[in-house]
Every structure is written in C-alpha cells, then in structure tokens.
Image: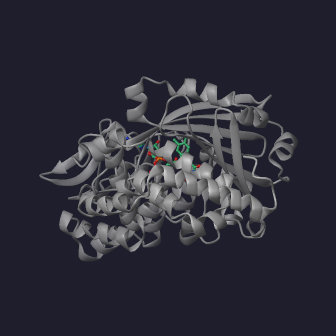
Amino acid sequence: MDKVTCIVVGAGPAGSACAYALARKGIETVLLERGRVPGEKNVSSFVLYTSELKRLIPEFRKDLPFERTVVRTDQVQLEPNDAKALTSYNYQWVDDPLAFTAYRRKFDAWFARKAVDEGVQLISGMKVNNLIKDGDQVVGVRVGDEELYADVVVGADGFHSVVGEKSGLITTWKPERCFLAVKEVLDLPSDVINERFQVADGIGCEQGIYCYHMNDLDVFSATLYTNVDSVSLAVFARLDELQKKNIQLHEQLEFFKQHPYVDNLIKGAKLREYQAHLLPDGGRVKPENLYADGVLLCGEAGGITATVTGMGIPTCLLSGMMAAETIGDAVKQKDFSKRSLKNYLKYLDSTALLAMVHKSRKESDYYASAARLEGPREMEAAADIYNQYWETDVMYISKHSFSLLVELYLRIGQYHLPGLLRWPLTALVKLSRLPAKLVEKIKKRLRKRYYEWKGQPAGR
Ligand SMILES: Cc1cc2nc3c(=O)[nH]c(=O)nc-3n(C[C@H](O)[C@H](O)[C@H](O)COP(=O)(O)OP(=O)(O)OC[C@H]3O[C@@H](n4cnc5c(N)ncnc54)[C@H](O)[C@@H]3O)c2cc1C
C-alpha cells in the first residue's frame, strides 16, 4: 500500500467512530490497531451511554454485544461509618435503553467490524511508533520498518498517544490533569446479582459512589455496575494527590472493598480481571493543539473527554465523528494544512465538546492552584452541605436558608469564576454574610420548625 487519504491510529471508540464516519463519506481509510484484535488492549467492562452511538449507527441495537440494560442508577455518598444512597429506576429505559453495560473486548471488536463493513481497511497487530513528516506536514506513519502514507493522520491512540507526541502536539502531561483508576471485574452468579442489586434478568444497575473523609484523599470516587454474571468495581483518584500524599490506589481499593456497604454487595465474588489505567481529565491538550499540518487528535489522545461525569466513551466517539467531518471538508478542498484542519474547532464547538474542554481545563487549573490548598477541601465542603440538606428537606430549606447558598458560594462557587469576577463578588458576598452565631441560630430554628412541620419531635 503506498498512500491512502486517511490513516486512523487506534481502534478504540474514538478511532472506530472516526473511521466509520469517514468510510460513510466514501473516504479511503486505514484503521491501525496495536492489539491483535480491537479491544484486546483496552480496560474491560464499562457502561455505554448510547445517544452518540445512535447518531452514528441508528440500528446499533440489532447486534450490539451488551451485558445488561441499565435501568437502575444509584448515587451513593460513602463515609467511613455510613452510606446514603439515592436510587432511581427508569422503567422507560427497559424498552428504549439509554445505557448498557458491556465488555470493551467485545464492544471494540464489534465497532471496528462495523467500520470494516463500511469499507475501512483494518490492520491489527500494528503498533505505530513514529510519524513521517515532509517539513511540518505529517504525511504518514511508521510501523516498525514499514511506512504508510496518507493525506491526513488521526491520532485516536488513547492516553499515551504516539501521534500526539511525535507530531509535537503533546509536549508534556501534568499529573493534575489526570486520574488514576484501578478496576476489578468480579465474578458473581446472576441470581445473586439480581437479589443484591434488586434487578431482574437482563436489567442492570450503575452506581456512582462518592467518598468523603476516606483515607485522607480529597477526591476519591468509585463506580460499581452489574454485568450478566459479574460486577465491575473501579476506584478513581487524582494522580497529583496520590503522588503528593504517597498513597497507593490499589491499597485504597482494598480498604474500599471492606466498607460494609461495598462488602454486602460483592461478598463471595471471585476476581476475574484486574487493571489499572490513567485517564486524562478533559482539557489535557489546549484546543489549538488538537490539530496541525496533516494531523488531528481525537478521543483521549486529545483529552476530549469528561472524566468527572464518567462519560468517556460518548465524548470520545463524538470527537471522532467531528474529526471525520473536518477531514470530509479538507478532502473537498484538497487542503490538509493546519489552516484547513482548524475547522475541527468549529465542529467541536457545534457540539458541547469544546465548551467541555474549556471547562475541564479550568477545573484542572483550580485543582493545581494555590487557591485549592488555601481554600477548604472542596469535596469535604460539598459533603457538609449535602449533609445539611439531607438532614432537613431540600424544598423547605431552599425557601428559607439564603445562608446555605452563601456558604455554598464561598466554599465552592467562587473558585469556578474568572478572577475579575471572583474578587468583587466574593467581597460583596462576604460583606452580606451573617455572623456565624446568627447563622447557627437560624439553622437551629429552621430545623425545629421543619420537624414541627413534619409532625416529628425535633430530636436531632
Ligand atoms: C477504569 C475505567 C473505567 C471507565 N469506565 C467508563 C465507563 O463506564 N463509561 C465510559 O463511557 N467511559 C469509561 N471510561 C473511559 C473510557 O474508557 C475512555 O474515555 C475511552 O476508552 C477513550 O477512548 P479512545 O478511543 O479515545 O481511547 P482508547 O479506548 O484508549 O483506545 C485507543 C486505542 O488505540 C490503540 N493504540 C494505542 N497506541 C497505539 C499505537 N501506537 N498504534 C496503534 N494502536 C494504538 C489502543 O490499543 C486502543 O485500542 C473508563 C476508563 C477507565 C480507565
């Protein structure tokens, strides 16, 4: 093979989406994957929210290899000695599913096969180790001793992106823009899963677990969800925090598994898989570094993801589709220069992706900033406030307690504003703040009235 129009590096969700969309446009595309089969190298089971996939392959449900349809979603707040869970069942998702649990091994292979069906040439077992350049223009890739040429190369090669590094688009990565995840897939009989998670055959549960005051980590969360006959458990923490505090995440996982809430759900389960993986927080790459002459980055390679929402795959998939739109225009204009590929930002902006990247960069900046160290611990502050609401009643308290909103702003809100707005507004809010004793008095009175209103003794 001498030259094709486009080479996509990496057959993960971003790469297969991009290749699929390019092939639908009739653009000659080669998809290169280092694994012997797509999915082989990727972190295993996951929850797939499907709205973006539906946009690309409307009939995807015909043969999508999924485990369970997610109908139950739980938000759990975990502290060392208690757990509070907000459970919701969305029964319309039984017939019109929004999310499925699935295995990456099966899903990635299925997705790449869909791209092949559209005319993409998939070459597996090929690790790209360098780019070929003509001046500044990327004109192909090197795989061992072999050279493949293309008008444009798409880097969809995940966190450790060779395309990003060799093109000079990614020069460094900072720990504060990354999460570390440790994940286990645990075998558990189907009927035990149904009983413990209160679901029926084929129906699944997804839990987002937020941990406070747990082993000294400011930011520590977990996900737990059900496959047919296994559950997936993953814990996440910021890499910079783990480094600074010299904390081992796999030890945190063991500690986490012993929490009575978690233990009750997984006891007796047998370890099937164990994996660790880095995740870029959104905004790892500046938007102007997502493209250069003859090259684009999408998915995790470009940090186009929303780690905090747990929606990595839909955003990666959408960025692959937007890269394909950009390349479609470049093919029409026969122009693969940086100037032409800049359209990528326009396409990302037409979705919510660019806004998401900007927001995530700001959040990461905040985490890396002195403000975070000087300020109160954000998660702890959120937990306190959450607890206050929990103890009373959201509808009732929100009518009466302006002071809680002020507290929320002072503890969290201000850090998300640009400096120019933050300082005057914070000064104003502080001036209007009631003395702490008075706030306490008001809260006590509110609580008393609340219990009277509910007809319960104000015992707490
Ligand atoms: C523990 C954990 C749990 C997660 N759970 C969820 C979840 O439930 N739902 C969700 O939506 N997201 C989840 N995510 C996030 C999600 O996995 C990522 O956002 C997503 O996989 C990124 O897709 P991608 O295509 O950009 O990169 P990847 O999935 O990393 O794919 C990159 C592909 O490129 C290939 N590759 C890499 N380098 C080369 C090379 N040099 N040459 C050739 N091929 C190469 C790799 O083998 C791989 O196939 C989770 C992540 C982790 C770590």
Residue 289: x and y in percent read 25, 55
Against 337, residue 186 (above or below) is: above
State the residue in front, 153 or 374: 374
Residue 237: x and y in percent read 49, 37
Quarter residue 410 falls in = bottom left
Against 211, residue 388 (above or below) is: below
State the residue in front, 3 or 192: 192
Against 392, residue 378 (above or below) is: above
Residue 91: x and y in percent read 78, 66
Q: Is residue 112 left or right of residue 283?
A: right
State the residue in front, 321 or 413: 413
Quarter residue 15 falls in = bottom left
Against 141, residue 263 (above or below) is: above
Quarter residue 400 falls in = bottom right
Q: Residue furthest bottom?
A: 332
Q: Is residue 448 left or right of residue 303?
A: right
